[in-house]
Image: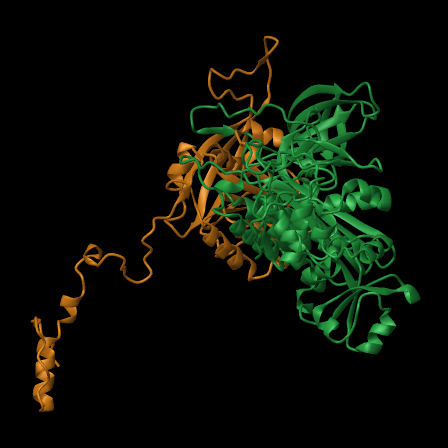
Amino acid sequence: MSASTAHATSPRPAAGVQGSGFRVLEENLPSPQASKPSSPQALPPGVHLGRTSIEPLRRLPSQLAVIDDLLDGGLPRGRVSELVGPQSSGKTSLLVAFLAAATRRSEVTAYVDLADSLSPASFATAGVDLERLLWVRPSSLKDAVRCAEIILQAGGFAAVALDLNARSSQSVDQSSPERPNGERSRRKTLSAALWPRLARAAERSHAALIVLASQRLTGSIATLGLETQARPLWGFTPSPAYPRERAGVRVTLFDGFDVAVTVARSKLGPPGRTERWLVVGG
Amino acid sequence: MRECNAPFYQDSDRPTQSANVENKGDAGASIVSSPHLTSPGGRGIKQPRIACLHVPDFPLAAVLRVQPDLRGEPVVVVDGEGTRAHIVCVSAAAARHGVCAGFSVAQARAVYADLVACEVSTEVQRSAQAALCDAAESFSPRVEDAGNGLAYLDLDGLGSLFETESKLANALAQRAAQLGLEAQIGVAGSKVAAHLAARDGGGVAVIPPGEEWSFLAPVPIALLEPGRQLAETLQLWGIRTIGDLAALPATAVGTRLGPEGVRLVARARGEDEYSLQPRTVPLQFEESVDLDYGIETIEPFLFVLRPLLERLVARLEMRGLVCGDLRLSMRLSTRGRDERTIIVSAPSNDIKSLLPLIRLSLDAQQPGAAVESLRVGAVAERLRAAQLDLYRPNGPEPAKLALTLARLAAICGADRVGAPAVADDYRPEMCGIESFQMEPGVRVLGRYGVGGRSPQHHNTLTPNTISSLSLRTIRPPQAVEVHCQRDRPEFVRGEAIAGRVVHLAGPWRIHGRWWSEERYARDYYDAQLGDGGVYRVFCDLRSGEWFVDGVYD
């Protein structure tokens, strides 16, 4: 059956004979090519092709230019993001930067602290408005995940940080057979249905769920996975405005980290990009 | 509704009607006339208008308010225990079967076997009386609580809200019905007259000003509830109506019947013993219920609790108030009591948000025995209108946030949920956790805190390629073994730390609380170990032990 390229303004009823009726019907039907819009802009309002979302993905910026450029504006809201790195790699400082920026914008954030490692003084120095940060200190992994889900279901939070990092004292060689890796054992205890459920809760609440860990835990659920590596800085002066002197004597202090953050995985763009920035003590 | 037009006083011995005249009968009784009475045709002071809310068979009405499913059933209210138990009130259905007040339970069941007997409950009656006063106070704050299903309301100032007193009386009756009480309303120039009108009016009765006499004169004297001996005396004298009694000379009555007779005559004349005494507005509202059997599980308990909350909320809404903190008092089967306060961070009259808070409290701490009676009290609060801010992003809804915090507290513990606070202490591991407030002055969660807040430091580092260093605290500080060389740490070994010190900075000495047992003195170091981790290590100068209390990350 050949497709007719003409389209009729007033379709005529089919004739009695089937063959001629088909021909009439073909003439009245618009061509398949003609029915397709030439561009998405030609679609009627409210209609979109396939699963294309008409809402742009909102971002949670860190107000650090290098980081926001790397992430095309910040962490995606309503999605799961993962910050992974070994001990003293700067991942916590990066997380705090996001929380500080959000609270400075008067947004409400939450921190589910499984390791009970939050330092209020450190957070305050980093610029986090402590009054807009909900601190939850669960005692078990199961409680931590449950608390995160409850907070996401409540809605209204811009960011929910789920700190599943191993206890900071467990900084052993992960290849050691004598001491099992806490993160690996945690991953085994987390059910497969957990992360999709949290992802759905984050999507409904439009909150950025940020999982902090020393190893990847979320699998393929995370929309964005960042890995951090850091080089400690000793005796480093970031700028002439920040000299390190005490009583007129220049001393060597631990000044911070030179952190490299890499987009290890991303569903929003190509992975692999790396940026560096400085984390210094206040 | 009955109304009449004749003036009230027709006796030549009646007292002079002027403001605040005090008459003394022969027996020395002091009778204060109702103030501001106007003489017929004169320019007098404004006459007061009093409304009386009267709930007949109040013990029965209180029970039916709590158990509305018993309406229409043959119900009797029993007072006393064992062989002394007797019936104080009967419902209409029970009365039709021949059961009367004063019967014993056995006698009543002999007359009609399918009676529903309910015990007198002072808690239930108190709640019902409070509800009656709430209904009255929803119209005017000048309400006198006369007890036992009786309340008086000063109608002064309500003329602008209602066209006629009849409409006001009907509105009063409807308001009381909303709270589960069938009240009879009477409106007159005095409390006594209003009370008599309510009892005799058959629902709603309004006596126009100055017409109390013609309205009440034919009313039987039994409504004044005279004593038995006095009633017999009056019966012998042929005094059968209020009009007859009011027509008696006061002096002669005092001589023959004593002070009680003088008071009875005064009441017959519509004279109040004392003017309306408004009660103070209660700050706490309570509802209670006695259970027929002990409840041990949560689901049936919540089923019983829900109607209590609904009645409580109805009373609060009638007064324009919202439910704040809840106080639960439960009498247990072990004769003990379980009393607890449930913090309602976001005051609300929404039952759906109050019930989960109670449930979380019960889940966290169960009563431990079956609950036999329950009393719920609510702290009334004014609803505050929140001013929206166009430039502030939306946060969690207060009611939803309060429930979320309660759920989190039930999982983690109330002292482990809140906003972090910098402790007033030089020791880095010290911290505080305070109520999570989204706005200054708005209480969202109670009150766990250690230390106070110190001024926050904002990140002033620039340019925006530099961020602030964060520390992960180890709580409590972990003991480690440190090998020193020339008083400087060279090797650190702990439960999960082992490595040679690659870089070291310090020491910094802190010491404090020298005046107490918690005195401390420490030398702190920043140490980078061979694994790349940078730790904060300190030596306790008092004990010589080493600890690691943080990791820079």
Whether residue B302 is visible to the viewer of this picture, yes or no, is no
Looking at the image, residue A108 lies above or below residue B218: above
Residue lying at the far front in this picture: please name it: B12
**Residue B29 place in picture, x, y as percent:** 81, 37
As displayed, is residue B411 above or below residue B393? Answer: below
- The residue closer to the viewer here, B424 or B237, is B237
Count of labels in the image: 0
Instruction: Give the quadrant of the C terminus of chain B.
Output: top right
The residue most toward the top is A248
Q: Quadrant of residue B545?
A: top right
**Quick one: which chain is green?**
B
Q: Is residue B529 above or below residue B250?
A: above
Q: Is residue B346 visible?
A: yes
Quarter of the image with the N terminus of chain B is bottom right
Chain A tint as drawn: orange
Residue reaching furthest bottom? Answer: A17
Residue A231 placement (x, y as % from top left): 53, 32
Q: Kindly indicate the quadrant of the structure image that contains residue A130.
A: top right
The structure residue drawn at horizontal position 67% and vertical position 56%, both measured from the top left corner, is B218
Left or right: A131 in relation to B365: left
> What scheme was used to colour the molecule?
by chain
In depth, the one of B378 and B302 nearer the eye is B378
Residue placed most toward the observer, B327 or B70: B70
Q: Residue drawn 72% across and 47% down?
A: B246
Q: Find residue A17 and report its horizontal and vertical position in percent.
A: 9, 91
Residue A171 in picture, x, y percent from top left: 65, 41
